[in-house]
Amino acid sequence: MPISFLSKLGAGIAMACVMLTTHAQVSDTRWQLRVMDLNHQVRVEGTIRLTDDPETKSCMAGHWKIAVVEERVVSDEKFFPLSEPLAYEIDNGTITLGRTRRCDDYLFMNGKFDNKTISGTYDAPGLPGLVHDQGLGYFSLTKIQ
């Protein structure tokens, strides 16, 4: 049975509302960031604010927005640089956060987006065909009220 135009339109509008709601929940929110090594030892900890401001200097394609570091509690700049500009992108319920301005020297955290907590992996993606992805550790984000 063919799906009617109105059904397709309704589904499209519902998807758009979900995407807008997710982005609205993130805009100008503060998060406690913890970046851990492969042994789950905290190497970096601080507070970041996810803004709705577009990141216009990113080397990566996509819809990146600026993440502002507000406070550094534990800072191992060689492991993950909180002193460098950070950006984030949300796509299909997954958040990617990291360094996007140093072309071909990216550092990314990827995890499933949730209203209060996010956790996932911390990686240094390689260039296709040249360098393999390197798993560096794990991360968590906890929303600050």
Image: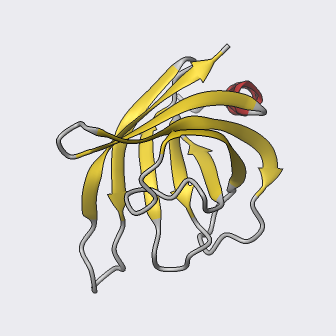
Measuring 46% from the left and 28% from the top, which residue is drawn there? Answer: 118
Quadrant the C terminus occupies: top right
Q: Is residue 27 visible?
A: yes
Q: How is the image coloured?
A: secondary structure
Seen in the image, is 97 located left or right of residue 66? left
Seen in the image, is 54 located left or right of residue 90? right
Q: Position of residue 103 (x, y in %)?
A: 54, 79
Measuring 51% from the left and 30% from the top, which residue is drawn there? Answer: 113
Residue 91 figure quarter? top right
Q: Position of residue 125 (x, y in %)?
A: 36, 67
Residue positioned most to the top = 145
Marks counted in the figure total 0
Residue positioned most to the right = 53
Measuring 69% from the left and 33% from the top, which residue is drawn there? Answer: 19
Q: Position of residue 40 (x, y in %)?
A: 23, 36
Measuring 62% from the left and 69% from the top, which residue is drawn there? Answer: 61
Q: Is residue 6 visible?
A: no
Residue 105 figure quarter? bottom left
Q: Position of residue 102 (x, y in %)?
A: 56, 76
Residue positioned most to the bottom = 130
Q: Nearer the viewer, residue 75 or 28?
A: 75
Q: Nearer the viewer, residue 92 or 2?
A: 92
Residue 25 to residue 121: above or below: above
